[in-house]
Image (spheres, grey):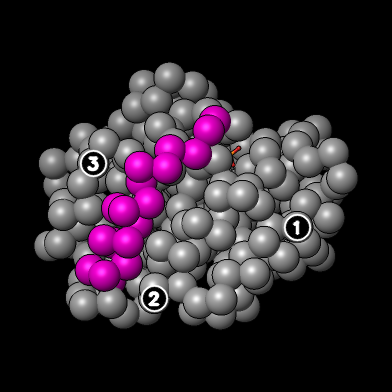
Amino acid sequence: MDKDAVKLAPSILAADFARLGEQVKEAEKAGADRIHVDVMDGHFVPNISIGPVVIQSLRPATPLPLETHLMISDPDLYLEEFAEAGSDSLLVHWEGNNNLHRTVQRIKALGKRAGIVINPATPASVLEEILQDVDQVLVMTVNPGFGGQHFISTTLPKIRRVRQMIDEIKPGCDLEVDGGIDAKTAPLTMEAGANVLVAGSAIFSAKEGIAAAMQRLRAAVGKVKSGTG
Ligand code: DX5
Ligand code: ZN
């Protein structure tokens, strides 16, 4: 996998919400491939973030795909609302969903890209029967709920396993990582087979500014000779 094949998905959770459109534009100009939007309900995770109205406001602000990471209980209740607000992909957790196949089919029926998210304690093997139906897998590299946490390095072997499964079962499926991704950890995840990197604080909280921070991330993954992908 060459460095140009790696996509960057800035997570707006770490952005300045008073200047959200402006900051997203800056990330777009600096070469962001998609914008990652974290939705939290204070129930599925112990934090509350944003809902469909923010997606709706962002929609005309950028042509980039808006991927929506749903950290909410019973995401089925809100799929249509997020789709209508302008989400391009809907990422739902494996955890707590007894009808994941149905959820995925509903996302596809809405004409959106479907992704499955697994938490650090969830094994790669749970993906086996659903992988063929999805466009994307997101491996959490921190416990979901907060930005600015430390990367959990024991997730690296799992990223490798998911990469193998994708290559066998659904080549072309994106393998994304989320949580604690910075210039140090990004190359590790890429080497393990990730091709989409979510980064919040490493981009929006960087002292050097959004564009320079994104350049630093790109340079860091550029040093990786070749992934296992
Ligand atoms: C955490 C969210 C992440 C978060 C990542 O639950 O899913 O997308 O914004 O933030 P950083 O990059 O700061 O770890
Ligand atoms: Zn996220």
Foreground disc of the pair 3, 1: 1
Q: Position of residue 22 (x, y in %)?
A: 83, 49
In the rendered structure, which disc, 2 or 3, sits on the residue that comes first in sequence? 3
Question: Which residue corresponds to the image point at 68% horizontal and 44% vertical from the top-left?
Answer: 202
Question: Which residue corresponds to the image point at 46% horizontal and 29% vertical from the top-left?
Answer: 145
Q: Is residue 165 above or below residue 121?
A: below
Predominant secondary structure in magenta? helix
Mark 1, residue position: 216
In the rendered structure, which disc, 1 or 2, sits on the residue that comes first in sequence? 1
> Residue 16, located in which quarter of the rendered image?
top right
Asked whether residue 154 is drawn in magenta, I would say yes
Estimate how packed mark 1 is, as few (under 14), some (14 to 19) or many (20 or more) residues with alpha carbons within 10 Å.
some
User: On the picture, is 34 further left or further right than 111?
Assistant: right
Mark 2, residue position: 229
Q: Which residues are magenta?
A: 149-166
Q: Residue furthest right?
A: 208
Label 3 lies in ligand 1 vicinity (Cβ under 8 Å): no
Q: CA distance from mark 1 to mark 2?
A: 23 Å
Marking on residue 122:
3
Kindly identify the amino acid type of the residue bearing the numbered disc 1. Arg
Foreground disc of the pair 2, 3: 2
Estimate how packed mark 3 is, as few (under 14), some (14 to 19) or many (20 or more) residues with alpha carbons within 10 Å.
some
Kindly identify the amino acid type of the residue bearing the numbered disc 3. Thr
Asked whether residue 109 is drawn in magenta, I would say no
